[in-house]
Amino acid sequence: MTSYNDHSGSGASATILPFAEPQRAARDTRPLRLITCGSVDDGKSTLIGRLLWDTKAVKEDQAATLKRDSGAQNDLGLPDFALLLDGLQAEREQGITIDVAYRYFSTDRRSFIVADTPGHEQYTRNMATGASTADLAVLLTDARTGILEQTRRHATIAALMGIRQFVLAVNKIDLVGYDKAIFEKIAHDFKELAATLGVRQITAIPMSALKGENVVLSGHSAMPWYEGPTLIETLELATTRSAQTGGFRLPVQRVSRPGESFRGYQGTVAGGAVRPGDSVVVLPSGMVANVKQIVTFDLVRNAAVAGDAITLVLDRQVDVSRGDMIVSIDAQPLTGHHFDAQIVALQAGGIEPGKRYWLKSGSRRQRVSVAPLSQLELSSGKWKTHEDTLAMNAIGKVLLSFDETAIFDIYEQNRSTGAFILIDPDTLNTVAGGMITAKRSQADAAHRDGQRVVLSLPADLADQLMSTEIFAARRDEADVRRVSAARAADLMKDLEA
Ligand SMILES: Nc1nc2c(ncn2[C@@H]2O[C@H](COP(=O)(O)OP(=O)(O)OP(=O)(O)O)[C@@H](O)[C@H]2O)c(=O)[nH]1
């Protein structure tokens, strides 16, 4: 392996930020999940093909076919690696919906799972799906064009989906004469973009996917000025997302009642771990119980962890229904009626303020109203106030307001219980994907929610209104502000005018 732990030197390596703990004793050797993103023609298929080919993930018969089929495909006499992915392409052209294709390859140090998603803008949704489980994102850019809006969009979505390790693949470097200055400029631009997204683990690599330079094999002879790692070396060193260590979460999918005496709550553990004897709380009711038994298929287990499909038996009769969440008593999720979230609008028509949607998170489905607050301007990387419809592909900050208590974790802390999709109740289409960023207090939410009725009343009237039962029942819908009698009269005049 090259000496890429040392990035202290000057020149090309100065643009590269090393991964956080490259020297630590126990390297993370768990399979790494990555996603590749790029605009059309940046060379994504060629890159993935290269990775598969040079790590010998391509079977011999496939290799022979590839060599034959791509004989006249390019003037370098190299196989057309993109053809490896052609089967998928054909399916896409036939309109068969394939959200994400997963491909597997390995070196003697580690195995990798790469989520291959189409680059076109209309497929942003698939990219979001692929990113939601990835540890690292490889963002491709054509050395001739540098960072494009699509690169920004992909980087933003990857960051929103919680990815904290980026590789910028400055591809087709052969087409700009292996120019170091061009590479450094693009790497610099990207570093600025990543910083606005809170991502600090960035490795920029000049590469030629077509020629296989700095992908798996070294590109040193063509680019002696580059002292950093190849793509595969970077991937070997990257860390997987730390196993979620937060509290136990079981979104209840089904209540099983096979006989009088047995009642079990079924679902897939979405965080933490559980053992018999643990104290748990059923949300939203808040009832407390202890775990009596953990059953999987027909086995009784002494523990279950995130990802396990289980049936949980409690030590007492409590009221639990589908959509509830059973959680550890000492590390509970957030419950409330208002949450801040970031969303990506995925459908033509976008996300309309004031419209009511279904929000689905795990097995829970709830009515929600979505108030856009701001939108990410991709050209500048800045959030701009935007309380209007979020158009397709727009990335926005929104306020979610629920009729009934909602239960979430912050996305950074739990990617299952912190993520959701929005469904249009009229078409049943998934119209947005999103993640929870914070809980809002009732008062703060009322103040900011553009959809809410705001009543400005003289203080005594305001107090009278707020003490009525009718108002108490509908407190979520209206915001009462105490103003002076004169101000209230002015406002009334404005209304009448
Ligand atoms: N010279 C050169 N050409 C490349 C390189 N990588 C890819 N190409 C060429 O660029 C073109 C596009 O590559 P693809 O791999 O099909 O690009 P893609 O991003 O997967 O494109 P879509 O599948 O349409 O999204 C092909 O003609 C490739 O041979 C490279 O590093 N150098």
Image: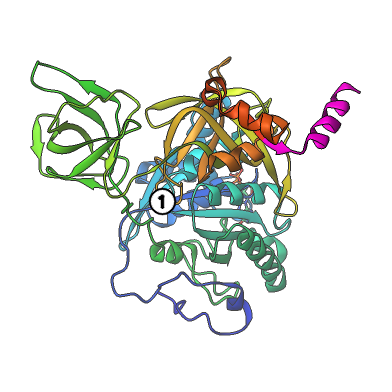
**What residue would you read off at disc 1?**
413
Number of on-image labels: 1
Q: Which residues are magenta?
A: 481-497
x 54%, y 35%: residue: 433
For residue 14, which quarter of the picture? bottom right
Q: Main secondary structure of the magenta part?
A: helix
Instruction: Name, please, the residue furthest toward the right.
Output: 497
Front residue (pair 292, 486): 486
x 26%, y 44%: residue: 328
Q: Is residue 368 left or right of residue 415?
A: right
Q: Secondary structure at mark 1?
A: loop
Residue 123 location in percent, x, y? 59, 35
Residue 384 location in percent, x, y? 74, 47
Is any atom of residue 328 visible in this view? yes
Instruction: Name, please, the residue furthest toward the bottom.
Output: 9
Is any atom of residue 80 visible in this view? no
Would you place residue 445 above or below residue 26 in this image?
above
Residue 494 location in percent, x, y? 87, 28
Would you place residue 4 above or below residue 325 in this image?
below
Front residue (pair 355, 194): 355
| Residue 483 falls within the magenta-colored stretch | yes
